[in-house]
Amino acid sequence: MYIKSLGLSDYRNYSRKTVNFDRHLNIIVGKNGTGKTNILESIIFVSNTKSFRTNNDRDLIRKGEEFARIDLNTNKDSYRVVINKRNKSLYINNNLINRSSQFIGKVNAILFKPSDLELFTQSPSERRKLLDIEISKISSRYIQSLLNYNSLLKDKNRLLKEEKIDEVLFDVFNESMVPMIKTIIAEREKFFEAINRYINPIYRMISGKQSDIKITYKKCSEIEFVEEELKKSKDRDYYYHYATYGPHHDDYNFNMDGYDINSIASQGQKRMVLIAFKFALVKYVQNETLSTPIVLLDDILSELDKDNQERLLNSIPENTQIIITNTDINNLKIDKEYRLIELKEEENV
Ligand SMILES: Nc1ncnc2c1ncn2[C@@H]1O[C@H](COP(=O)(O)OP(=O)(O)O)[C@@H](O)[C@H]1O
Ligand SMILES: [Mg+2]
């Protein structure tokens, strides 16, 4: 799948803007603050129905306006998101979509931005967020289980805060959670298995180095022990007044040649590992959905030296659409054909 055009109305700094994209390589160039990241953000919004810059959809509405609209046309379908101050409406080919799970992931885009490097040192909950977004794109079973689990977890935690805990209700919550927890763990296992298969060859290709990269999934328990662990956690839950066991505590970490990446890798190596991770995600999604995600690189290339830039561009799968932003086209070494999209400051007024 690829994006043919994007239309923004009263979105961030744009009152009205149309961008046409090339099927393969696109480079958006503009000074700081001209709205490069905003364009990528709007594409990601159509992909996830969430922004990566804010949790408040209102921020996306151009100052002084009532609602924002994103129109995204791919070679197959047209997508529209209308955001007003209270909610948002989603459309595919002009039909209103009521369940966001039927919209999320239809446009499949993967973004890489400099602050992604924080992934290695962030809190587990931030790392889980990324995990959930990526698996949700390819598995509606996962989204459903996760949504149901989180809602039950909220109820269970609320119950645990009560003075006198209704034990029957507590057991009912735990019992209902079992299949959801199993699905979540199973899908996460499958995810990491696949990513680990892809990440090494990709890392070696883009970095030119022979290191071994592996992601370790730190799960709450093996699938066959879910019931048992839930039972075992009961006393602890009562004591701490919250749910101490479950996939809401899962985490994962990155290893390089057997060492934690944070203790061994340089900034530059971490950057390459992260790019390899993202490309592995592309491959994974490609295999699972038989469609190729769109790769968005926000301000990434200029931080790499020319050799790495070249290796990276050459390792992007053949029929992938890619959109790169940069402040200066002269900082890039690109021998391929591309569409140049230039943003000017005067467009913002
Ligand atoms: N809701 C909004 N209304 C109007 N302008 C906005 C809004 N949100 C962000 N902006 C403007 O968008 C610009 C930032 O765009 P951004 O995409 O981050 O630029 P770039 O990536 O090119 O550096 C800033 O000038 C900011 O003031
Ligand atoms: Mg930017």
Image (tube, rainbow, N blue to C red):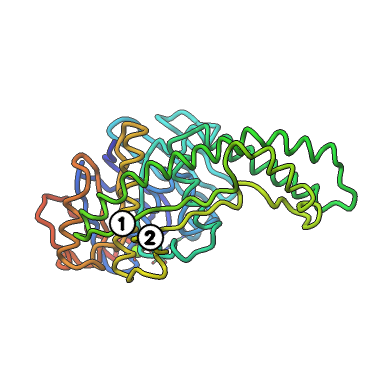
Vertical relation: 120 (above or below) 80: below
- Does label 1 or label 2 sit earlier along the sequence? 1
How crowded pointer 2 is (Cα within 10 Å; few <14, some 14-19, many 20+) is rated as few
In the rendered view, does 310 fall on the left or right side of 256?
Answer: left
Q: Which residue is mark 2?
A: 258
Q: Looking at the image, which residue is at 32% across and 37% down? A: 286
Where residue 123 appears, as percent x and y from the top left, is: 54, 62
Label 1 to label 2: alpha-carbon separation: 8 Å
In the rendered view, does 182 fall on the left or right side of 35?
Answer: right
Observer-nearest residue: 5 or 290? 290
Q: Looking at the image, which residue is at 70% across and 33% down? A: 176
Q: Amino acid at mark 2?
A: Gly
Where residue 241 appears, as percent x and y from the top left, is: 78, 55
Q: Amino acid at mark 1?
A: Asp
Q: Looking at the image, which residue is at 29% across and 68% down? A: 268
Where residue 146 appears, as percent x and y from the top left, is: 58, 40
Q: Is mark 2 within 8 Å of ligand 2?
A: no
In the structure shown, which secondary structural element does the residue marked by tag 1 occupy? Answer: loop
Observer-nearest residue: 243 or 6? 243
Within the image, what quadrant is residue 204 found in?
A: bottom left
Name the residue at the left extreme: 335
Residue 20, which numbered label? none
How crowded pointer 1 is (Cα within 10 Å; few <14, some 14-19, many 20+) is rated as some
Q: Which residue is mark 1?
A: 212
Within the image, what quadrant is residue 326 found in?
A: bottom left
Q: Is residue 126 visible?
A: yes
For the residues bearing labels 1 and 2, Cβ distance under 8 angstroms: yes
